[in-house]
């Protein structure tokens, strides 16, 4: 497992998301990257059903195609659980309403968000360009770059920044929060997923901000 | 010409009797009988009693007449009563007959069958013969039954053969699974219950011994009350033979010689059922093992092609080394034609046993799931797969995990390790015998696996083992494909399967030992080391590795020893004695004796002539002798 940085790539006015993705793809191919497969990261949100009226807890369940056997569950306070994919079945059971009573968790419809796109390999780097969509509405572009050999962010951040700036430009200035907090510790897949969740939440908030218009 | 007007009338003849003619000529005719009267008259004429027996009939007719006489005094219906009764009975009888006929016609409940006609009686002679034959067969059946009864009565021990059968059956049940199907007892000798998924099943039948013991054979054949019937394809005995042989490089796999399994004894039919069942089970196991190996050999995509020919699998494990797995199955029917085999069969019994163990492991894995798992869930994912989720394994990790090794691959690995180990062993032993000077000792590790062995080779000089510094030690880690060598100074070298490489390494270490020994001896005795060269670049080139050399000088500075040892060039010791004797006596007062040491030539010493078991003692002797006080 290497170090992963996820950034949103801004879509300039007048251009469609697909065009931006294509241009990024062309740039990568010029650099010598090879397309290996497609990837997908998706997120579903669940809300707890507290009859006593206590504070509502939100649970996010994410999948990453890079770790096909795992399922990530993140609470609103940041606690992360890495489990087998069968965890979804458990959550589904929790969501079920049985014998008249409502389930413990309730799925919040319309908030399923996912990032899908091609995956490129460029010697030690893996670059993924994902188009984010929520209920088949295009929201933005997320670019993920992974540097496989190193697992400690503090040691490879500079190298990654240089590599990313070569095709992404000035978007990359500061390391993501998850990377910044773990400069000297081992980087884990749950950190990647936390980065994705942060971006997804931003996209959702953006929707809310835009909707009154 | 028909003339009209003439009427012709036809009248019936008056048949009615005229009762009286009145005075006025009116005839009073007896009215003709009405239909019922006519019927009554006719009925009276019928004698219903005639169908009964004649005597009775007469009686009834008499009764009938009396009845008729009596009936004259009774109303007119009376004469019909008997008639009515008779008609009623006849009606019921006819009704019954009708029913019978209907039922017979339906052919469901009754059928009308022809009565066989009696043939003419055969001749009495034929009859006699037929009857005699019939009696004879009946008699023989009875006699055999009586004999059996007599036998069972006469048996000693008080246990009847019937009980003996059950006691044997109990013993059989303690070892094998039996069940009763209809009238017969069927058993299962396959490995199905142990986890095997082989298509061929082994069912055997248990029968009682019914044949009488034949007296001609004598008492050599022991009779068992129980007989086991084994399916024909599992008869005889079989074993799997694994052979590793080196073949010349030019020979390719296609021109291999087919093995003819040598005839080995079969278990005779009247052997104990346990041994027969055991051999049959072994046959089934060997079949399954060979079928699995053959299937893998065909399906496996590897660099080296595997050849499967009827009952043999042949593959090259190293260039020039061939592994052959043969399934030898002798049905035991007249196999004595194969004479004594030329050459000893060099099977690898350990590898054959290993094959058996591997298949048993496969069986075990199908049945047992790695802990922890609930008792009610015997199937599921392996432990690694279960951990894959929580540890967020990537796609490549999962893929690596899913590839499991086949039986053939495993046995090939073991065979390769076996070959490497044998070769290394033989090389070390040979060199230890060939090289007398330093002693070569090999310490093999007790803990080793079928895929890895370790050996530590220590080279010392006899009598000087106290000087640990002079030891040369090598660690050889013998794996599957090659050998990893770690020298004393922790350098690692990777060797391939060639035997010569191990030999080279050992020879080189021997030469290093000579020099290290010289160095330490010098230190102990008091000579000074002028130069030590672990890898000298001068002098003739060695075939492999490099030579090392050392220069020693005596404490009085008047003698110099130079030792050079190389793996191919051997050991050479040179001595320099200064030419102080040749000096012009006139110069001796002017020149400092120490300058005299600069000149002189090195002369080689013939080590064979010097007394001493090894270099260490010889050197010691040389140094002691040569060290002369001025």
Image (cartoon, rainbow, N blue to C red):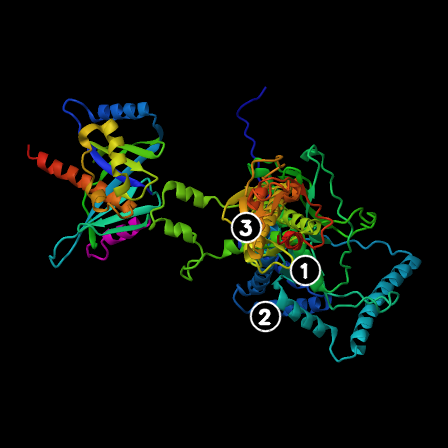
Indicate whether residue A100 is drawn in magenta.
yes
Q: Chain of mark 1?
A: B
- Residue A77 in the image: x percent, y percent? 17, 51
* Res. B313 visible in picture: no
* Spatial CA span between label 1 and label 2: 103 Å
Vertical side of B287 occupied by B248: above or below: above
Front of the two marks 1 and 2? 1
Of helix, strand and loop, which one carries label 1?
helix
- Residue A69 in the image: x percent, y percent? 35, 45
Give the number of the disc on residue B528.
Answer: 3
Q: Pick whichever, B468 or B130, lies toward us.
A: B468
Q: Is residue B534 left or right of residue A109?
A: right
Pointer 2 local density, CA inside 10 Å: few below 14, some 14–19, many at least 20: few
Q: Is residue B46 left or right of residue A128?
A: right
What is the span of residues highlighted in magenta in the rendered image? Answer: A86-102
* Position of the N terminus of chain B by quadrant: top right
Judging by the rendered image, the residue that carries numbered circle 1 is: B278
Q: Pick whichever, B247 or B187, lies toward us.
A: B247
Q: Chain of mark 2?
A: B
Q: Are marks 2 and 3 on the same chain?
A: yes
Nearer-N-terminus badge (1/3): 1
Vertical side of B328 occupied by A30: above or below: above
* Res. B544 visible in picture: yes
Identify the image quadrant of residue B307. top right
* Spatial CA span between label 2 and label 3: 176 Å
Q: Residue furthest right?
A: B125
Q: Chain of mark 3?
A: B
Of helix, strand and loop, which one carries label 2?
helix
Front of the two marks 1 and 3? 3
Taking the spot 58% from the left edge, 59% from the top edge, the residue there is: B446
Taking the spot 74% from the left edge, 50% from the top edge, the residue there is: B330
């Amino acid at each position: 497992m290497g170090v992963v940085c996820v950034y949103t790539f801004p879509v300039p006015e007048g251009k469609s998301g697909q065009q931006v993705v294509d241009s990024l793809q062309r740039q990568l191919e010029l650099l010598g990257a090879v397309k290996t497969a497609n990837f997908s990261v998706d997120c579903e949100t669940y809300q707890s059903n507290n009859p006593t009226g206590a504070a509502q807890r939100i649970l996010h369940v994410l999948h990453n195609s890079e770790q096909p056997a795992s399922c990530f569950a993140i609470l609103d306070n940041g606690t992360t659980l890495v489990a087998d994919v069968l965890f979804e079945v458990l959550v589904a059971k929790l969501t079920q309403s049985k014998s008249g009573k409502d389930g413990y968790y309730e799925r919040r419809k319309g908030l399923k968000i996912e990032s899908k796109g091609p995956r490129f390999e460029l010697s030690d780097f893996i670059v993924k360009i994902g188009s984010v969509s929520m209920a088949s509405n295009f929201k933005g572009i997320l670019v993920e770059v992974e540097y496989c050999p190193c697992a400690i962010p503090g040691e490879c951040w500079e190298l990654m920044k240089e590599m990313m700036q070569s095709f992404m430009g000035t978007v990359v200035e500061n390391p993501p929060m998850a990377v910044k907090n773990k400069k000297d510790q081992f980087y884990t897949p749950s950190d990647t997923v936390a980065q994705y969740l942060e971006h997804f939440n931003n996209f959702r908030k953006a929707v809310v901000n835009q909707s009154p218009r | 010409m028909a003339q009209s007007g003439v009427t012709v009338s036809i009248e019936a003849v008056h048949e009615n009797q005229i009762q009286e003619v009145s005075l006025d000529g009116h005839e009073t005719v007896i009215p003709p009988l009405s239909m019922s009267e006519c019927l009554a008259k006719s009925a009276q004429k019928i004698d219903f009693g005639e169908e009964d027996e004649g005597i009775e009939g007469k009686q009834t007719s008499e009764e009938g007449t009396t009845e008729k006489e009596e009936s004259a005094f009774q109303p007119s219906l009376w004469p019909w009563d008997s008639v009515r009764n008779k008609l009623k009975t006849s009606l019921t009888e006819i009704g019954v007959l009708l029913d019978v006929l209907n039922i017979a016609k339906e052919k469901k409940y009754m059928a009308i069958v022809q009565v066989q006609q009696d043939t003419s009686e055969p001749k009495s002679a034929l009859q006699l013969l037929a009857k005699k034959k019939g009696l004879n067969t009946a008699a023989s059946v009875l006699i055999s039954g009586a004999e059996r009864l007599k036998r069972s009565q006469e048996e000693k021990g008080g246990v009847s053969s019937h009980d003996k059968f059950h006691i044997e059956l109990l013993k059989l049940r303690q070892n094998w699974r039996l069940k009763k199907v209809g009238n017969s007892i069927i058993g299962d000798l396959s490995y199905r219950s142990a986890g095997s998924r082989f298509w061929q099943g082994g069912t055997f039948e248990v029968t009682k011994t019914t044949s009488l013991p034949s007296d001609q054979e004598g008492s050599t054949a022991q009779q068992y009350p129980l007989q086991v019937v084994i399916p024909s394809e599992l008869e005889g005995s079989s074993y799997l033979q694994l052979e590793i042989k080196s073949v010349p490089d030019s020979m390719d796999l296609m021109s291999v010689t087919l093995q003819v399994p040598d005839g080995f004894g079969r278990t005779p039919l009247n052997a104990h059922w346990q041994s027969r069942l055991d051999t049959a089970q072994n046959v089934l196991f060997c079949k399954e093992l060979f079928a699995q190996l053959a299937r893998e050999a065909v399906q496996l995509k590897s660099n080296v092609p595997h050849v499967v020919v009827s009952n043999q699998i042949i593959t090259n494990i190293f260039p020039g080394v061939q592994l052959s797995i043969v399934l030898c199955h002798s049905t035991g029917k007249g196999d004595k034609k194969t004479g004594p085999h030329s050459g000893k069969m060099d099977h690898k019994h350990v590898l054959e046993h290993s094959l058996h163990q591997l298949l048993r492991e496969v069986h075990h894995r199908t049945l047992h799931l790695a802990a922890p798992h609930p008792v009610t869930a015997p199937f599921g994912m392996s432990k690694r797969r279960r951990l894959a989720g929580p540890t967020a394994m990537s796609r490549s990790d999962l893929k690596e995990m899913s590839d499991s090794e086949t039986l053939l691959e495993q046995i090939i690995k073991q065979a390769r390790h076996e070959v490497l180990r044998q070769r290394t062993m033989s090389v070390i032993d040979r060199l230890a015998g060939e090289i007398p000077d330093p002693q070569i000792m090999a310490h093999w590790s007790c803990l080793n696996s079928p895929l890895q062995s370790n050996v530590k080779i220590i080279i010392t000089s006899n009598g000087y083992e106290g000087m640990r510094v002079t030891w040369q030690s090598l660690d050889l880690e013998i794996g599957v494909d090659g050998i990893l060598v770690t020298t004393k100074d922790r350098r690692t070298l990777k060797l391939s399967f060639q035997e010569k490489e191990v030999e080279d390494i050992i020879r080189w270490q021997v030469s290093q030992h000579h020099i290290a020994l010289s160095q330490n001896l010098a230190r102990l005795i008091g000579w000074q080391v002028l130069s030590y060269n672990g890898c000298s670049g001068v002098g003739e080139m060695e075939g492999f590795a490099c030579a090392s050399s050392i220069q020693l000088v005596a404490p009085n500075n008047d003698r110099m020893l130079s030792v050079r040892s190389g793996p191919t060039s051997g050991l050479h010791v040179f001595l320099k004695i200064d030419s102080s004797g040749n000096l012009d006596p006139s110069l001796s007062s002017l020149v400092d004796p120490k300058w005299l040491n600069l000149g002189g030539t090195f002369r080689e010493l013939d080590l064979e002539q010097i007394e001493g078991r090894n270099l260490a003692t010889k050197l010691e002797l040389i140094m002691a002798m040569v060290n002369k006080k001025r």
